[in-house]
Amino acid sequence: MFPDLPIVLVADDPLVRGGLSALLPDEIPVVRTVGSDSDVVVAVATSAAEVVLWDAHDGIPDPRRLDVGVPVVVLAPDADRASVALGAGAMGVLRRDLDESRLAACLLAVRAGLKVIDPRFEGLVRSAPPPGDGPSEPLTPREEEVLELLAEGRSNREIAIALEISPHTAKFHVDRILLKLDASGRTDAVVRAARLGLLRL
């Protein structure tokens, strides 16, 4: 037995919310369930939750939204989403096909201040540069705007529409960001930017 650990569960699919709630023992009550488009900070503050369990099945979690005031555990279907979650400050990343005991153990571990990474992600999650290693040259104000949209998972076309620029110009800015951050791709750029403090989390 252990002291109760109230959590907020974030998932877009109501069936997923129900299934995850059913996995947890009575000592880990789900005190609030919300979708990923909800204000998770408010949900945590108004429910006295101590941990957030966030299902990332439907897309890469926006790094700026993982800073909710309590530890966050992300259920990720692949290493890319796990990597982004870690770069954004998640205390735990697990595969979505975990069992009840492993899920409960992870939630308890992050409450105790430990970081938990599913063994199946070890070696797959890219290592990002330490905070002291900045970009090769500073990002321009426009590149910072593009980076914010990249963190939201926007495509080049969506970035172009949001900033009222051409898709070609949007691609140019994205390529410059990847070059400056020495990133292998869009997801890697978001991870590195989050670790470097270039995103407003």
Image (cartoon, rainbow, N blue to C red):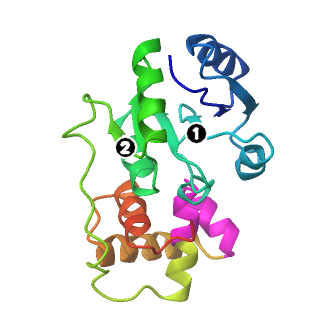
Pick the front one: 134 or 44:
44
Residue 25 circle label: none
Q: Could you tell me how far apart the alpha carbons at marks 1 and 2 are, in whole angstroms?
A: 12 Å
Q: Secondary structure at mark 1?
A: strand
Give the residue type at disc 2.
Leu
Label 1: how many Cα within 10 Å (few below 14, some 14–19, many 20+): many
Pick the front one: 131 or 24:
24
Q: What range is drawn magenta here?
A: 147-164
Pick the front one: 200 or 137:
200
Q: Secondary structure at mark 2?
A: loop
Q: Which residue is mark 2?
A: 114
User: Which residue corresponds to the image point at 32% horizontal and 37% vertical from the top-left?
Assistant: 117
**Residue 132 image point, x, y percent:** 28, 79
User: Which residue corresponds to the image point at 27% horizontal and 61% vertical from the top-left?
Assistant: 128
Would you say 201 lies left or right of 116 here? right
Residue 51 circle label: 1
